[in-house]
Amino acid sequence: MDIKNSWLCTRPVAHRGLHNSELPENSLGAFEHAIKEGYPIEIDLRVTDDGEIVVFHDDKLTRMTNQDGYVCNYDAATLKGTHLLKSDGKRSDYTIPTFEEVLTTVNGQVPLLIEVKNSSKAGAFESKIINMLHAYNGEYAVQSFNPYSLEYFKENAEEILRSQLSCFFCKSELSGFFRRNLLKKLKLNKVSKPDFVAYRFSDLPNKFVTKCNLPVLAWVVKSNADYESVKPHCDNIIFEKFVPQK
């Protein structure tokens, strides 16, 4: 595929859906809004205690639900009954969706950029995602900060486009100097063999991205001013909190 002429580089990608003050991030409402406006959607996948896959960004529930605990310690049924918060902190009508629900809702109407949130050993989680995507009729790609997760996709579903996520990590974002350095410099691309790179917009341009010579998506752009500043250094953006102007 010619990625630079594909959806990955021709239409800005809505970060966690086209969310706003009434539609929480990673909610079915935010996804429906993105579909209505014709934007590809970026989503986050996590695995539950009972091995199901839900769409939720944080490892902890607190910020988006005001409840304690980690996603991985709850079963999918419990999370399905957990309401997401609106931006003002009030409870919305939307609950944490499963990956299956999101696939059914989107139904190929717009492409999906799927972030795999896996800090453990790659295998069972990725395998289940692959099986679900093979049964899905729509365009999609996967991305992850974990190069070994992407390696699993490369070895078991090479046809699925892969993106290595990265940035200039601070200690609070990623532990271990050596690990931060390797990922920042995209040294582990030799493991993940990505088709494109998604790099934090405020860390662009840099020699590591330039040297890898791959299409680049900039994340997360939050204003038209930042969009204009990063345009010369990327092929597309992942955005939120504004509507990109061409």
Image: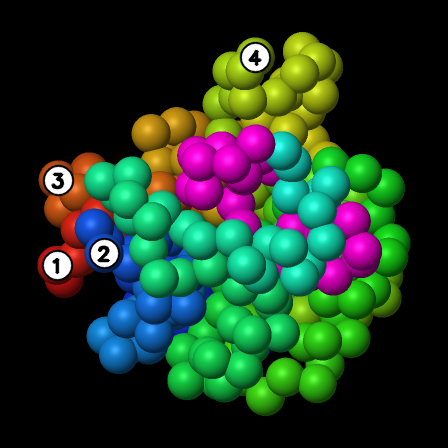
- Residue at coordinates 45% horizontally, 53% vertically from top-left? 83
Front label number (2 vs 1): 2
Judge the density around disc 1: few (<14), some (14-19), many (≥20) Cα neighbours within 10 Å.
few
Q: Give the mark nearer the N terminus: 2 vs 1.
A: 2
Residue wearing tag 1: 245
Please state which amino acid type lies under the numbered disc 4: Lys
| Residue 190 visible here | no
Residue wearing tag 2: 22
Which of 95/221 is in front? 95
136 sits left or right of 28 in the view = right
Please state which amino acid type lies under the numbered disc 2: Glu
Q: Give the mark nearer the N terminus: 3 vs 4.
A: 4
- Whole-number angstrom distance, CA of label 2 to CA of label 1: 22 Å
CB under 8 Å between discs 2 and 1: no
Please state which amino acid type lies under the numbered disc 3: Ala
Q: Which residues are magenta?
A: 44-68
Q: Quadrant of the N terminus?
A: bottom right
* Picture layout, residue 118 above or below residue 105: above
211 sits left or right of 11 in the view = right
Front label number (3 vs 4): 4
Which of 53/116 is in front? 53
Residue wearing tag 4: 171
Q: Give the mark nearer the N terminus: 4 vs 1.
A: 4
Helix, strand or loop at label 2? It is loop
- Residue at coordinates 68% horizontally, 24% vertically from top-left? 182
Q: Give the mark nearer the N terminus: 4 vs 2.
A: 2
- Whole-number angstrom distance, CA of label 2 to CA of label 3: 24 Å
User: Total of numbered circles in the picture?
Assistant: 4
Residue wearing tag 3: 225
